[in-house]
Amino acid sequence: MGTVEAVVFDMDGVIVDTEAAYCRILVDFFGQHGVSLSWDEVSDIVGCSAPVYREHLERWFAQVPQPDPSWADLGVEEAVEPAFAALDGRLGELAMAGLHRCLEGLHDRGIPCAVASCSSPAEIEVALCSCGVRDQFAAVVSGSEVAHSKPAPDVYLKAARLLGVNPQRCVAVEDSNTGIEAARCARYYVIARRETRFCFSQKGAHHMVDTLDEIPLVIDQLSL
């Protein structure tokens, strides 16, 4: 048994509240092009890997009755990207409640932090910088930088290697069942930010919090 050596955060839905915004944008985008998607349908993308996200987009684009000619030479992700452009300038406003107090508390305790996300390296950098927390993370790992993205444990194992710590002495902060599974497979202790807007299960988490600023106090009680 020992103390916590590091805390590794998922990004979307944990550091920034992007997932609900992304879902609303997709509902609006496809609705404008003649495809009616339910909230449950689009919420299936929450926490999924890039290949699974692409599969969802391909299926939805295939239902569009009159495809825009400008999509002809674009991949599905490129075609939908302009719909998300307006969100880029608002990412700082979407910082999750308690984020800054959480990171300050972990810093005061001398606990290093990292990010392990399915998002691309560029997307991670933009989000962290927009929230003013990039310098709080000693390592950043994208699912595109490992052999297998979540729910495989690769991103969490790589984060532990970069920090030079034992995965079994690490805490993951997650929200989705996919991320929780990935962290559990990496032998992390998992704290989940409670999420009620989506249908995924969080029962695999060891502990639940309502806001991130609860995490330092939870860690004070842990012995891994």
Image (cartoon, rainbow, N blue to C red):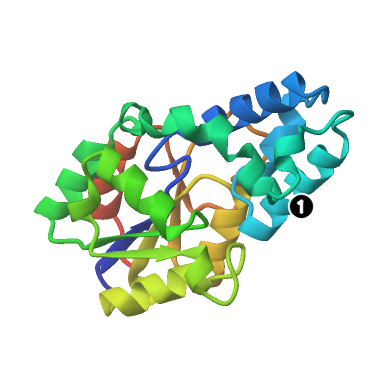
Foreground residue, 62 or 143? 62
Q: Quadrant of residue 43?
A: top right
Q: Quadrant of residue 5?
A: bottom left
* Number of numbered discs visible in the structure rendering: 1
Residue 171 in the image: state x and y as whole percent.
37, 60
Please say whether residue 126 is visible from this viewpoint.
yes
- Residue on which disc 1 sits: 55
Residue located at (60% from left, 72% from top): 148
Q: Hey, which residue is sitting farthest left in the picture? A: 108
Q: Which class describes the residues within 10 Å of circle 1: few (<14), some (14-19), or many (20+)?
A: few
* Depicted 28 relative to depicted 1: above or below: above
Quadrant position of the N terminus in the picture? bottom left
* Depicted 39 relative to depicted 146: above or below: above
Amino acid on which the number 1 mark rests in the picture: Glu
Apparent side of residue 79 relative to residue 57 in the rendered image (left or right): left
Helix, strand or loop at mark 1: helix
Please say whether residue 201 is visible from this viewpoint.
no
Residue located at (83% from left, 22% from top): 34
Residue 133 in the image: state x and y as whole percent.
22, 46
Residue 6 in the image: state x and y as whole percent.
28, 65
Q: In which quarter of the image is residue 163?
A: bottom left
Quadrant position of the C terminus in the picture? bottom left
Foreground residue, 187 or 146? 146
Residue located at (79% from left, 47% from top): 58
* Depicted 180 relative to depicted 1: above or below: above
